Amino acid sequence: MVRGLIILTAGIFLAAPSLAAPLAVKVVDAAGKPVRDAVVTLYPTNGAQRSLSPGRFTVAQKNLKFQPFLSVVPVGSSISFPNFDSTKHHVYSFSPAKRFELKLFAKDQSRTVEFDKPGVIALGCNIHDAMTAFIVVTDSRWTQRTNAQGLAMFADAPNSAGRVTVWHPYLRAPGGQVQQTLAAAQRGVGFAIKLRPPPAMTMSGY
C-alpha cells in the first residue's frame, strides 16, 4: 500500500485583500517522492467564474494502447479516437458523466465524441481488455495536472474560500477523489491519501 501526502500553500498576502494569490499543490508519496498526473481542481465559493473554452483533443489507439493514458479537457470539448493499429478497436465507456460506444472500426478510421458534462471518463476496448485510459472533463478554469515534480501551480487563484479536489486513477477513495475546504486566508491544507499500484496487465505504460 502506498501512501501519499498533498500539501497546499498559498502566496503571502502583502497588502489589503487582493483578488488573487498564487496557490501551489504538491503531491508526494510516503517516501517523499513526487506523484505525477494527479488532477487538482479549485472551486472558489466567491462566485468567480473562469470556465475554459471547449477544444478539440485526440486519444489515439496505437500499439494496443490509448495514447495519452490521461487527458484533461474542458466541458464541451470533442475528442477524436483515431485507430493507428492494424487490428480493429471497439472503444466504450460506462462512466455516468459520458456513456458511449464506438463499435468496431479499423486502421486509419476515427470516431469523435463530445463531452458535455464534468466528470471522470474511464475508457476501455471491448476487443483488448488490457487497454485502459481516463479522461477528466472539468468545469473549472483552475484545473491542473501535477508534473514530474508532483506540483500543480495556480498563479491566479482567487483569494477566497473554496473547495479543492484531487483525483488520481489509482487513488483509494470513492471515485478516485478526495476533497477538502480551503479557508479564504488559509496558507496550507493537507490531504492523506492512499494509492494502489497500477493493474499488472495495464498496457498504458503508466
Image: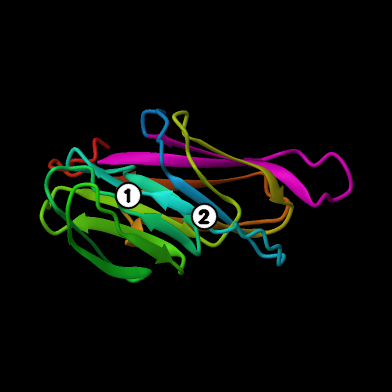
> Does the CB distance between marks 1 and 2 fall below 8 Å?
no
Can residue 166 be seen in this snapshot?
Answer: no
Residue occupying image coordinates x 36% and y 46%: 70
Dominant secondary-structure state across the stretch colored magenta: strand
Where, by quadrant of the figure, is residue 93 drawn?
bottom left
Give the magenta part as a residue range: 1-29
Depth check, front residue: 25 or 132: 132
Amino acid on which disc 1 is placed: Pro
Query: Considering only vertical position in the picture, is 16 above or below 161?
Result: above
Magenta span contains residue 157: no
Where, by quadrant of the figure, is residue 13 drawn?
top right
Q: CA distance from mark 1 to mark 2?
A: 23 Å
Q: Of helix, strand and loop, which one carries label 1? A: loop
Where, by quadrant of the figure, is residue 203 drawn?
top left
Residue occupying image coordinates x 38% and y 60%: 120
Can residue 74 be seen in this snapshot?
Answer: yes
Q: Is residue 83 left or right of residue 26?
A: left
Q: Of helix, strand and loop, which one carries label 2? A: loop
Residue occupying image coordinates x 76% and y 38%: 12
User: Can you give x and y, in whole percent of width and height, for residue 178 in the image?
Assistant: 43, 56
Magenta span contains residue 16: yes
User: Can you give x and y, in whole percent of width and height, for residue 43 in the image?
Assistant: 60, 60
User: Can you give x and y, in whole percent of width and height, for residue 50 in the image?
Assistant: 66, 58
* Residue 169: mark: 1
User: Can you give x and y, in whole percent of width and height, for residue 62 in the image?
Assistant: 23, 40
User: How many marks can you see?
Assistant: 2
- Image colouring: rainbow
Q: Residue at label 2?
A: 55
Query: Considering only vertical position in the picture, is 188 above or below 101?
Result: above
